[in-house]
């Protein structure tokens, strides 16, 4: 029986090129791409260009200074103080959110009527505006009419502290308020991660003689690696952009003890109108956030089969 073979390819015949076909999906994403280009990409490029100039709002002459703004920023003690405040706030709130959120999620893992009520109570501050939270806590901590000092006086404290006017207490107070507001978000994310852990793993660990603490360390925590990475990354990026809470509670005072990098950026750009210097601050902060996020993703990387 004869075997049929395909005809041999002609020598020197170029391969057939794929015909380009228009994908209609581009029409659906085009409006979003236009908005991103106009309101995100173009301002980023413009701020980079402004950071290379002595750019003052209202001035007709904006001379090119190259890296002059960045050099001045390097020698600016106020910027380094703002960076220190931002890093301290971010580190404290991030660690506090993860630790407290994990503890609360583990405690409220079982679904009962009171655990559902407590979950709602913990999560409720997160949905409130930062400015609203800052204003409310500013009144609560007021040394004259605030409820916090009134309660401390009722408990026998003769001289309640002046929370937001003390250079040593203002930043810890802002950290405590930031932690109180955001811990509910971390709790909800970690709680959702815990509920996705298969019950078979806990049963197998129990049969092997593992107690509650060992089950938490060797079963729950490894399963929560993606959730822990997500919550710590979000908390870090949010903390490095600290502005609203400080603006509402202290305005950066007293004596710059709570002034964050974004607060300093606002002061230079929208109070002193030095947009070139403010743009340089924005780009330095962008690089810091990018670097910190890359380190976190590198250190806490995981695979689905881990």
Image: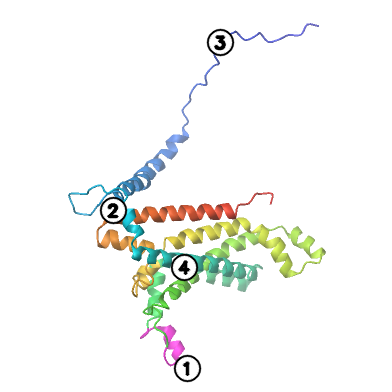
Disc 1 from disc 2: Cα separation: 53 Å
Residue 38 lies in what quarter of the image?
A: top left
Q: CA distance from mark 1 to mark 4?
A: 32 Å
Instruction: Give the x, y percent position of residue 97.
Output: 54, 67
Q: Residue 215, how many percent across, how many down?
A: 73, 65
Give the spatial CA distance, label 1 vs label 3.
96 Å
The answer to the question of whether label 4 and label 3 lie on touching residues, with beta carbons closer than 8 A, is no
Of residues 84 and 278, the one drawn nearer to the viewer in this rendering: 84
**SS at badge 3:** loop
N-term-proximal mark, 2 vs 3? 3
Q: Is residue 45 above or below residue 232?
A: above
Q: Residues under labels 2 and 3: Cα distance?
A: 59 Å
Where does label 3 land, which residue?
Answer: 13
| Of labels 1 and 4, the one closer to you | 4
Q: How many marks?
A: 4
Q: Is residue 243 visible?
A: no
- Can you tell which of label 4 and label 3 is closer to the viewer? 4
Q: Which residues are magenta?
A: 143-159
Sequence-wise first label, 2 or 4:
4
- Give neighbour class at mark 4: few <14, some 14-19, many 20+ (Cα, 10 Å): some
Labelled pair 2, 4 in contact (Cβ < 8 Å): no
Residue 296 picture quarter: bottom right
Query: Between 94 and 292, which is closer to the camera in this rendering?
Result: 292
Given contact means CB atoms under 8 Å apart, are the residues at marks 1 and 3 in contact?
A: no
Q: Earlier in the sequence, mark 1 or mark 4?
A: 4
Q: Residue 156 has which mark?
A: 1
Query: What kind of element bears circle 2?
Result: helix
Q: Report which quarter residue 75 is drawn in.
A: bottom left
Q: Which residue is mark 2?
A: 276
Residue drawn at x 37%, y 43% is 37
Please name the residue shown 57% across and 57% down the image: 229
């Amino acid at each position: 029986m004869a075997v049929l073979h395909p005809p041999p390819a002609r020598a020197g015949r170029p391969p057939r090129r794929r015909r380009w076909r228009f994908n209609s999906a581009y029409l659906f994403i085009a409006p979003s791409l236009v908005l991103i280009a106009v309101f995100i990409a173009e301002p980023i490029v413009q701020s980079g260009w402004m950071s290379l100039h002595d750019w003052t709002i209202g001035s007709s002459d904006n001379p090119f200074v190259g890296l002059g703004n960045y050099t001045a920023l390097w020698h600016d003690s106020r910027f380094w103080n703002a960076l220190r405040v931002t890093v301290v706030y971010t580190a404290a709130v991030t660690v506090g959110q993860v630790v407290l959120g994990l503890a609360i999620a583990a405690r409220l893992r079982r679904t009962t009527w009171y655990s559902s009520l407590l979950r709602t109570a913990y999560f409720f501050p997160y949905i409130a505006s930062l400015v609203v939270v800052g204003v409310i806590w500013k009144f609560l901590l007021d040394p004259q009419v605030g409820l916090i000092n009134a309660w401390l006086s009722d408990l026998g404290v003769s001289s309640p502290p002046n929370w937001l006017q003390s250079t040593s207490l203002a930043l810890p107070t802002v950290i405590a308020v930031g932690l109180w507001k955001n811990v509910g978000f971390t709790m909800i994310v970690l709680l959702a991660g815990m509920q996705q852990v298969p019950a078979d793993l806990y049963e197998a660990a129990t049969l092997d003689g593992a107690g509650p603490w060992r089950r938490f360390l060797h079963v729950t925590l490894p399963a929560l690696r993606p959730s822990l990475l997500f919550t710590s990354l979000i908390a870090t990026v949010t903390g490095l952009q600290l502005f609203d809470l400080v603006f509402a509670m202290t305005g950066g005072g007293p004596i710059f003890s709570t002034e964050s990098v974004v607060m300093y950026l606002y002061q230079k750009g929208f109070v002193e109108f030095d947009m070139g210097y403010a743009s340089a601050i924005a780009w330095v902060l962008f690089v810091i956030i990018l670097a910190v996020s890359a380190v976190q993703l590198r250190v806490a990387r995981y695979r689905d089969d881990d």
